Amino acid sequence: MAKKQFKAESKRLLDLMVGSIYTHKEIFLRELISNASDAIDKLYYKALTEKISGVSKNDFFIKITPDEGARQLVIEDNGIGMGKEALESNLGTIARSGSLLFKDEEATGKAASKIDIIGQFGVGFYSAFMVSKEVKVVSRAWGEDQAWEWASEGADGYSIKEGRKDGPGTVITLTLKDDTDEEKYGEYLSGWKLRTLVKRYSDYIRYPILLETPQAEAAEPAPAGEGESAEPQAPKGPEVLNSMVPLWKRPKAKITDEEYADFYKDKFSDFEDPLKVIHTGVEGVISYEALLFVPARAPYNYYTKDFEKGLQLYSSGVLIMDKAKDLLPDYFSFVKGVVDSQDLSLNISRELLQHDRQLRAIEQRLEKKIKSELEAMLSGDREKYEKFFAAFGLQLKFGLYDNFGAAKDVLKDLVLYYSSAEKKLVTFGEYVARMKEDQQYIYYATGESVEQIDRMPQTELLKDRGYEILYGPDQVDEFALKMMREYEGKEFRSVSEGDLGIEESEEEKQKAEKEQKKYADLLAAVREALDGKVTDVRLSKRLKSHPVVLVSGEGGLSLEMEKVLKQMPGAEAERIKAERILEINAGHKVLKALAKVYEKGKAEGATKADREAIKAYAGILYDQALLMEGLPVEDPVAFSNAVCALIEKTV
């Protein structure tokens, strides 16, 4: 029989479609199963609308039969089938879709919402040529007595002739390509591979997908008992590969916690139950159902560049994307789960979406839902929330800082910080509710650990005045809180900033002015000795017991930021330096000792060593302040020598 030519494009189009549109060759099975499901949907819909008797949903099936000897894979359905004209029209014209045509014709009135056709493009069938050297389709349309056979070896064309088939439906026979060093096409005849692909891509097709196991494999000899001869068991029936009804399609009231947990652990390979389950659905301009999970602990690679965020995206129960990253903002990237929507505009490979706005609409709704569920956990089960925060709180803090604080309003009530007063984690709202009437700022301190921060000299005055301080032990905390700027009108203020904004009594002001005037020349001398290292030297209003401290100047870069940035690779990091101010405790003996050294150097008859002594003492105090701040001493050898020289003088 003479071959007919494809009506749309020739070899170039088919080669392009097969070679470029699909990312993975294994997708062919998903496409053929989806087409079979469509064919069954059409017949079932026809039976409902035309009140055809004798058609039961329980009788429908999709069957897969591998034949290793013939190197063939057969996919069969008992759906609506196709006559000669439909075969010619649908399979003879690349990019023509019978499913899309059916949907367009039927999608009117109230029935439109009940039509759920998976395949809307006419190229899915041709994915079979990625793995096949010949494709045969035998189909018999519902209500017709004659079956027809369509056959093709690729872009050279196809043939149609009368065929034989009992009952309506379609049988597709793929003769697989020969194996090569790069591609092992024969693996698609393996029961294990077929089970894996169906479970991965088509587990929620609503009709049973049967694997017809060869009788030689199914009929295993029964164990022989004493005095008995071994006889073969009866052949097993076809194996149902898919679960058909997704968990997220079932009513919430009928799903147990154990079922949710089992689904999560099986689907996402976790050995622990999820900390939180979010089962939600939306109907409207774009409808979807989602089943989301918050893990109990962070994956081992969560805070590395190797981690891939994203939800599994389904379209009418068919897996479209395994990691749809656009469905989650980065700060909620810890969430795992599935989203299923029949309203997505897919491209012709059904692997990508054509309209980002649809994903964006779903992402915005999921973001609000995740936030509200976390807030409910925070208010209703604090212990569980703190467990969650221990695992993923760092990601929320990154979210405060990322993208110039774009998400800070979303996250500000979800983050926790350790309180110096409460000795536990608290929210910003809880802190503000306890603020003193005269308190202008939300005070915070950052460092390597809560214990280290608690010992910081900069916290002394605030603690003495009874002010609460939030401790940030993570590297991102300084950046995140700077980006926050304020909460409910209260500005964040680091304990290491130059001005703490604490009101002084008139007596305190007069005392400070008197001391500043008394030691003005000394402070100027120390400032000169540390020229290039600090921008100012002054008496401290925050120190109680410690002699000196370094605080940040007026620039936007703090000392804590400098420490973090200097740990990053690159020459630029070496040049990063915060503006530094050295504060000396006016009530500490070290100031009086420093004053004596300065006066001795100015006295008549002072030696050069006496005049230079103030520089050495200033250097020691500055290096001490660096060490207390957790910054490296610029010249450790010089510092050691200066300390030794000072010790020698006391002997």
Image (tube, rainbow, N blue to C red):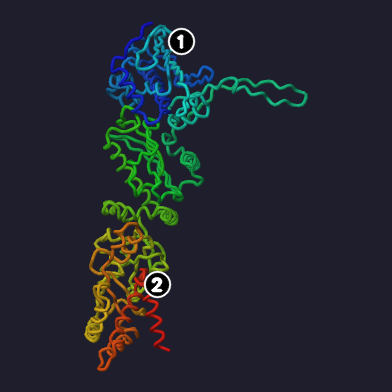
Q: Quadrant of the C terminus?
A: bottom left
The local secondary structure at tag 1 comes to loop
- Which quarter of the figure is the N terminus placed in? top left
Quote the CA–CA distance across marks 1 and 2. Answer: 85 Å
Dot 2 crowding, Cα within 10 Å, few <14, some 14–19, many 20+: few
Question: How many numbered callouts?
Answer: 2
Report which quarter residue 125 is drawn in: top left
Residue 387 appears in the picture as rendered: yes
What x and y, as percent, mark residue 341? 35, 33
**Which residue appears at 34% of the width and 28% of the height?**
20
Q: Amino acid at mark 2?
A: Arg
Camera-nearest residue between 273 and 594:
594
Q: Are marks 1 and 2 in contact (CB under 8 Å)?
A: no
Residue 74 in picture, x, y percent from top left: 47, 19
Tell me the tag on residue 455. Answer: 2
Mark number, residue 90: none
Residue corresponding to mark 1 = 165
520 to 2, vertically: above or below: below
Measured as percent of width and height from the top left, residue 490 is found at: 26, 64
User: In which image quadrant can residue 422 be found?
Assistant: bottom left
- Closer to the camera, 442 or 304? 304
Q: Amino acid at mark 1?
A: Lys
Which quadrant of the view contains residue 605?
bottom left
Furthest-front residue in view? 608
Reading the chain from its start, which is encountered first: label 1 or label 2? 1
Residue 508 in view, yes or no: no
Q: In this rendering, would 182 be left or right of 9?
A: right
Binning the other alpha carbons within 10 Å of mark 1 as few (below 14), some (14 to 19) or many (20 upward) gives: some
Q: Secondary structure at mark 2?
A: loop
Q: Position of residue 231 (x, y in %)?
A: 69, 20
In front: label 1 or label 2: 2
Q: Residue pushed farthest right?
A: 227
